[in-house]
Image (spheres, rainbow, N blue to C red):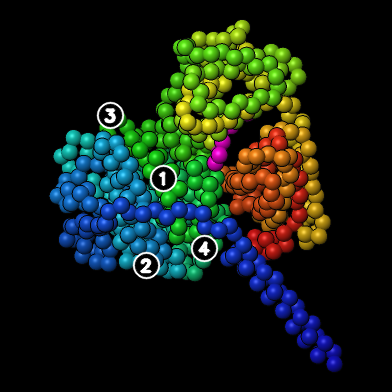
Amino acid sequence: MFLHSVNLWNLAFYVFMVFMATLGLWDVFFGFEENKCSMSYMFEYPEYQKIELPKKLAKRYPAYELYLYGEGSYAEEHKILPLTGIPVLFLPGNAGSYKQVRSIGSIALRKAEDIDFKYHFDFFSVNFNEELVALYGGSLQKQTKFVHECIKTILKLYKGQEFAPKSVAIIGHSMGGLVARALLTLKNFKHDLINLLITQATPHVAPVMPLDRFITDFYTTVNNYWILNARHINLTTLSVAGGFRDYQVRSGLTFLPKLSHHTSALSVVSSAVPKTWVSTDHLSIVWCKQLQLTTVRAFFDLIDADTKQITQNSKKKLSVLTHHFIRHPSKHFEENPAIISDLTGTSMWVPVKVSKWTYVAYNESEKIYFTFPLENHRKIYTHVYCQSTMLDTNSWIFACINSTSMCQQGVDLSWKAELLPTIKTLTLRLQDYPSLSHLVVYVPSVHGSKFVVDCEFFKKETRSIQLPVTHLFSFGLSSRKVMLNTNGLYYNIELLNFGQIYQAFKINVVSKCSAVKEEITSIYKLHIPWSYEDSLTVAQAPSSTEISLKLHIAQPENDSHVALLKMYTSSDCRYEVTIKTSFSQILGQ
């Protein structure tokens, strides 16, 4: 009888554990946002021109090939070598196809056509015969050596050209990104053969499934080399993760090691990338139109006008990648932007003395400069916040220095703004700018288009609200909430005690609005200050919006920052924010 009861308890325990594991797996495989990526299409028939390799090389690597991507007239013209563009090499990952290069290759070709081929990129792709290198690592070293030979072969295709490249840029998907990093470990490899490395959903930290010693040894060799030689590695590297939609490679594995003396590496989750703002699964990261457009824009901004190749200036490369992948000010990239701008011309100057101001621009016949004197506001308020629904790339907000009412020249603050899906915003702490006498908002003359500009001064303590997260084992039975009853445009909800991977919560934001005729949009941005893994939710008000709150990277021990829910709200609405533990997502984490 005793043994029978013990067996029943054991059976009940195992059934319970299986049930818990099933809940966790369900969350991993199904508990993410829908695919919001737009498909990238080719405008002409894609062609893959096989590049003839030296006979010895082809004999040594009979299963591998090198291709040049092309479409239409470009493909026809480039069947006759040598080439004249900027070489980019795409490396597919585990079971990946060389044809995956077509999305970014096609978009780059369209961009080159838009500028009449002043510059253009030649996209090459390696055929690794769709080897399963994530399951068996015995081919990884062979792939690495073949890529080295491909780079040398590619550069020879430009021999004799006026602006012949001396290096290539590499895009590596999944394990292809690790193979690219492994190139630096080869004894006879010259580091300056690569000018830029972008990896997509590459597990840099450790293998997803360490099934054999070849994979683990390969990882150990690559990561040890990059850590021990970080001072001497000057390769600008960007790692892009797919976020929670990518259940094959969790984003925590894609973050490159943060070394204090290695400042040329960036790691970001696709949901945080400006103008992308979506999570991608493991395959869609190579064809997601929003992300590929961002990547191509960055490539063209990286071109040096003198050499007609990707710049060798490491500082510029990092600035371009930061501009496109980390924080976009809604301005075209400029290496040395003009900080002082002329504010002269036939324009109206309108003083604004109120602390909260809204202007609706529609069919404006002349330019207007709205000026906000800061002296009196400094005595009462700590910050100023402005936003505009005009999402062009022109400068829109300035500051006068020691002026009475208007100034001929102003400090261009537009570079400090941040682009969001429906608005561009700027927040300034007034004490950081003691020499500024006036804030100036510029409204251009517009015909037929309508946009809204808002500004408000506020005290930090009225807009920063602390919200401790619920206990891990509350199982979603208890919750905590805050009410936003003031008519502000911007709030920071400080999510206290949130910083571990295993934590997971659901946030519910309920907006209730007064009678308004036009559609109201609110933006809720989850900001993680210790890593670039922010995510945005755009909601129409009034509404009830649910947001998942969980992390890819845990908060470092010596980091005192607090995760924030940044709320870009409407003054016509009131908001209620509720947080509770999500047990199923905890199991998923």
- The residue identified by callout 2 is 131
Q: Residue at x 39, y 53 (%)?
A: 40
* Of pointers 4 and 1, the one earlier in the residue sequence: 4
Question: Closer to the camera, 9 or 76?
Answer: 76
Are the residues tagged 3 and 4 within 8 Å (C-beta)?
Answer: no
* Of pointers 3 and 4, the one earlier in the residue sequence: 4
Q: Say if the magenta span includes residue 423.
A: yes
* Of pointers 2 and 3, the one earlier in the residue sequence: 2
Are the residues tagged 2 and 3 within 8 Å (C-beta)?
Answer: no
Q: Tell me which amino acid carries mark 2.
A: Glu
Q: Tell me which amino acid carries mark 4.
A: Gln
Q: Say if the magenta span includes residue 579.
A: no
Q: Marks 1 and 2, how far apart in space?
A: 29 Å
Frontmost of labels 1 and 2 is 1
- Outermost residue toward the top? 404
- The residue identified by callout 1 is 293
Q: Is residue 60 above or below residue 361?
A: below
Frontmost of labels 4 and 2 is 4
Q: Is residue 320 left or right of residue 306?
A: right
Q: Is residue 265 left or right of residue 401?
A: left
- The residue identified by callout 3 is 306
Q: Tell me which amino acid carries mark 1.
A: Leu
Q: Is residue 118 left or right of residue 302?
A: left
